[in-house]
Amino acid sequence: EGVREGVVYVNKKNDNGIWEEVSRLYGSDYGINSLGGMLSLSGNNLINVRYVIDSEDTSLRKVLVDVLERQDDESWILKSTTDISSHIGQGEIGNYLAVPTSIDLSGNILVIGFNTDNTYGQANPTYPCFSAEYGYGAAYVFNIQLDGSLMFVQSLSGSLDDSIQCDSPRFGDRVSLTNNTLAISAPLWCLDCGNIEEPGGFDTHYGCVYIFELQGDGTWLETHQIINLELGHNTELGYFGLSLSESGDRLFVIPRFSQTAGDKNDLFLYEKQN
């Protein structure tokens, strides 16, 4: 099989509001396989996250983070490649390293989500709402140093309460970071998953978005949970937080489907209050 080097198309908006391609990055130019699989851009830094499986021994896996920096002539240089595998938990019982599912970069702060990571616990097999092969999920925060290297800051999970929620809500499925506020979704979060009396029975996956705020010491603290309980009253609905994005003090959240839109998606807008 050929090596999938990947390519990234960099576009810039001109004075007329039209987006124009200004550069094209090929993985082979940087010694990178799968360039562009998972990207985030902030300022002059472009982050590329790779999940690498050894070609001879597939049990050997690692997560690599590439930091590329934009130059004045719109070219890009590779500043660093960091193996963050030692910080990441397993994604399946007794097997492989968790696979990254989301990434966001704001300034020099990088957050990567792993929705099956078992660092904060494994699925409880007595809850049939989700496979017991996977973990609760986690997100990892790093600071990018001036030389492009990564400094590990903190691993995050949502509040755990086995009495009311599923053990495997896929925390870290999506992450969004802006203005010292971090939103992390857990779209399979559910109320009392083992309770068949709940509307929707075992499949009442309401979904939840956890809000974290940056503290003065550089760590992150969970401050809020956003749950739309109306979305979980039908097994075809719910999955709140399947997609999310922040802009300034506004948070946009999209579930799988919604009650009001039928087979279409609704967009939920939340605004941070002082």
Image (cartoon, grey):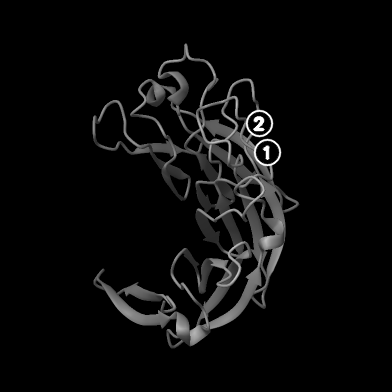
Please state which of residues 208 and 146 is positioned toward the viewer in this rendering: 208
Task: Residue at 67%, 78% (x, y): give it.
Answer: 147
Residue 33 percent location from the top left of the image: 49, 76
Q: Residues within 10 Å of mark 1 (few under 14, many from 20)?
A: some
Closer-to-camera residue (256/79): 256
Residue drawn at point x = 53 percent, y = 77 percent: 68
> What element does badge 2 sit on?
loop
Q: Where the C terminus falls, by quadrant?
A: top right
Which residue is pictured at 61% across the width and 60% down the height?
A: 109
Circle nearer the N terminus (2, 1): 1
Q: Which mark identifies residue 20?
A: none
**Is 120 situated left or right of 79 in this image?**
right
Residue 48 location in percent, x, y? 51, 69
| Disc 2 to disc 1, C-alpha distance | 10 Å
Residue 71 seen: no
The residue beneath circle 2 is 160
- Between 159 and 117, the one lying in front of the other is 117
- Quarter of the figure with residue 244: top left
x, y (%) of residue 97?
Answer: 62, 56
Looking at the rendered image, the disc whose residue lies closer to the viewer, 2 or 1, is 1
Quadrant containing the N terminus is: bottom left
Q: Which mark is residue 121?
A: 1
Count of numbered marks: 2
> Could one spot residue 235 in this view of the protein?
yes
What element does badge 1 sit on? loop
For residue 206, above or below residue 53 = above
Decide if residue 73 is on the left or right side of residue 58: left
Q: Amino acid at mark 2?
A: Leu
Q: Quadrant of residue 84?
A: bottom right
From what the image shows, is residue 42 above or below residue 154? below
Given contact means CB atoms under 8 Å apart, are the residues at marks 2 and 1 in contact?
A: yes
